Amino acid sequence: MRCMILCLKLGLIFVLLLSVPVPIKAFSRNYMQCEYAVKKWASSSLVSEVKDDKHALRDLLFFLHIPRTGGRTYFYCFLKKLYSKSQECPRSYDKLRLNPRKPHCRLLSTHDDYSMISKLPSEKTSVVTILRDPIDRVFSTYEFSVEVAARFLVHPNLTSVARMAQYKRRNASIVSTMDVWPWKYLVPWMIEDLFARRDARKLRGQSHLEASNPYDMEDILMPLHEYINDSIARDIIHNGATFQIAGLTNYSYFAESHEVRHCVLRYQTLGGYVLEVAKKRLDNMLYVGLTENHRGSATMFANVVGEQVISKHTTSSSSTDVGTDDLEKSSLHTVMRSDANYQGKNTYQMLKNVSSINKDEASRENSTAAKLMEAYASCISTLRKAQAQRRINSLKQISPANFTKDARHQVPEPIIQEIASLNSLDMELYTYAKNIFKKQQEHAMQSVVYADRPSSTLPNSTYSNSCSPHYWKSLSVATTGLFLLLYISVFPNARRQSKTKLSVFYHICINSQPQRNVIVEGA
């Protein structure tokens, strides 16, 4: 009996040992296939990222808007003051609806990822973007998902929510948040969760709620630690900036993006290839801003991007007639309306008013970077107040939950570290972006210094003055005079005999200088 049991155990162990190599071989084969696909994509992407002059603004400006980086304020307080409505690509803020190659399409601002380049004239397109600290961006994404979803709690059930969503989609003039990536995935997910928790409270007869940490209120909303570990968050939120700049979101236009994205999400070690592509693309962008360095980023945007757009407006207006659409000018001196004017209006209407157009004001070509910054400061102040009020009204639906900067400090450190670990690619990309930003500042400072310095003090001015015709003529006369004195002092008796020869020598030296001068200047 014991022998039989022992044989059975040995047989079971033998079977298990035989079965082990099968998944190992399958894993190895799948990994090798993924590694080949990712490497091939990365190699072709890196080759295609060679740019001649990244500092020069091209015909089309593509603002690659990474969610929760402050891009909306740049769009409404900068770009809509630099470009007229006729120059925007159709419905470009939420997603591209029409062909951006249409005439006079000069601005594309969208949540679409870098793969949008495949639909644009890439050689005529400049790309700009803004990055944010990945941990803060995850916090902001969570808070905004809850904020938008909470607005729908005024409806009695999910059915009424669905009807409202259908109405907004039928109304073409309304840009719904749920039409915009990634909120079209994140908000419905959060709406369903909020309704489920509200229904559960009703069944329990729970009415009084207390909360010390709004990021961990299981009775009211999905806790942060549950949110960041959900498959939806892992698919869309984590390392979102890297995937968006690489062009590998679930909204990508690249044919091979699905396979590459699947492989990188499955085998994290392959993420390094995606990171290198994203870094290279940042290197070739016209402008890279940082949300945390708000003032410095805005100032640089005004000087690097704004000045060139204004210069293009000036050039085009001096060489072409002004059409009807071009009369649609936005003022850079607009006095923003008081906060009371925005009460009770939705986000779309509020933003439309903030970037309102006044045809009687100064035109864009008369603007400067300094005036642009003045208008931006006024615009963003009003915009932030309106957005803050809207958030307060939304969060009333899930009271006592309230998201503040101080409340973030209540989140345990292990969760913070987990967010950093889940966003390891974004963490490294953000560090790289900070170095790019520093280089941009140095380049901008050098440009300002050389632009303000008088021409006589420029490094090339000494050389150019020394190579001028007057310089060479004076030098030749002095040299000839020196030779004359030496000749007289050394050969006093030959003064009379050499007078004719010296005169001929002097004239030859003088007359030969223009020819020498041409050679020097040409070199």
Image: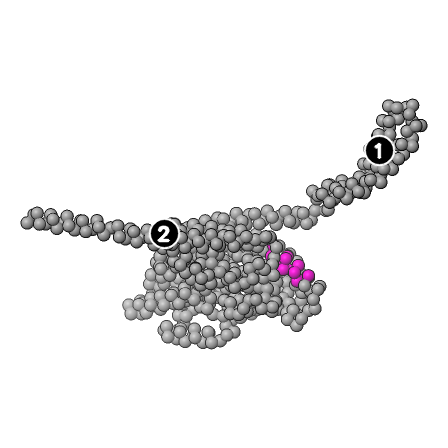
- The residue that disc 2 covers is 32
The disc placed on residue 506 is none
- The segment highlighted magenta reads 304-315
Q: CA distance from mark 1 to mark 2?
A: 80 Å
| SS type, badge 1 | helix
**Residue beneath the point at 21% across and 49% down:** 17
Which quarter of the rendering shows the C terminus? Answer: top right
User: Which amino acid, by three-letter code, is at mark 1?
Assistant: Thr
- The residue that disc 1 covers is 480
Query: Mark 1 touching mark 2, by CB under 8 A?
Result: no
Is residue 406 at all visible to an observer of this figure?
Answer: no
What percent of the width, then of the height, locates residue 153?
39, 70
**Residue beneath the point at 47% across and 76% down:** 170
88 inside magenta stretch? no
Which callout, 1 or 2, points at the residue further toward the start of the chain?
2
User: For the residue carrying disc 1, how many other residues have a C-alpha within 10 Å: few (<14), some (14-19), or many (20+)?
Assistant: some
